[in-house]
């Protein structure tokens, strides 16, 4: 299910270590100094995982 919340913003904080998710967001178009509007939230019904849909500074989704 894809939902939209018009007032949700996030700040990007990069995880470190060998199990950090790839690609690293701060090296791929995001900035730690900005808040980003969440364009959508995807939650697969068969799992408890949630994914935020964002656009970075290069207008990539």
Image (tube, rainbow, N blue to C red):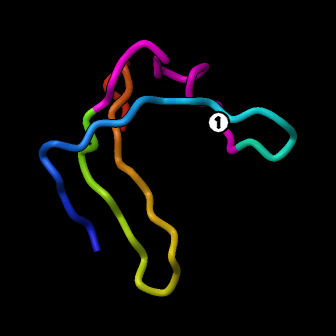
* Residue at the limit of the structure toward the left, as seen here: 6
Q: Residue at x 33, y 33 (%)?
A: 55
Identify which residue is drawn at 57% across, 21% down.
Answer: 26
Determine whether 3 is above or below 11 in the image: below
Left or right: residue 18 versus residue 46 is: right
Q: Name the residue: 39% across, 71% down.
A: 43
Q: Position of residue 45 (x, y in %)?
A: 41, 84
Q: Which residues are magenta?
A: 21-36
Residue at (39, 51) in percent of width and height: 52
Image-quadrant location for residue 15:
top right
Residue 27 placement (x, y as % from top left)? 61, 19
Q: Which residue is mark 1?
A: 23
Reply above or below: 61 against 53.
Answer: above
Vertical relation: 33 (above or below) 15:
above
In the displayed structure image, the side of residue 7 where residue 52 appears, left or right: right
Q: Secondary structure at mark 1?
A: loop
Q: Quadrant of residue 2?
A: bottom left
Q: Assign the magenta stretch its main secondary structure.
A: loop
The spot of residue 19 in percent (x, y) is 81, 47
Q: Residue furthest right?
A: 18
Residue 16 horizontal/vertical position (percent): 76, 32
> Given the current orientation, which residue lies at the most extreme top position?
33
Q: Quadrant of the N terminus?
A: bottom left
Mark 1 closeness class: few <14, some 14–19, many ≥20 residues within 10 Å:
few
Tally of numbered discs: 1
Q: Is residue 25 magenta?
A: yes
**Along the viewing direction, whichever of 60 and 3 lies nearer the viewer:** 3
Asked if the stretch drawn in magenta spans residue 11, the answer is no
């Amino acid at each position: 299910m894809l939902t939209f919340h018009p007032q949700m913003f996030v700040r990007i904080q990069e995880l470190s270590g060998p199990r950090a998710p790839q690609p690293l967001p701060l090296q791929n178009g995001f900035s730690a100094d900005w808040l980003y509007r969440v364009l959508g939230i995807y939650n697969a019904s068969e799992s408890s995982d949630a994914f935020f849909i964002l656009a970075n500074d290069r207008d990539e989704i």
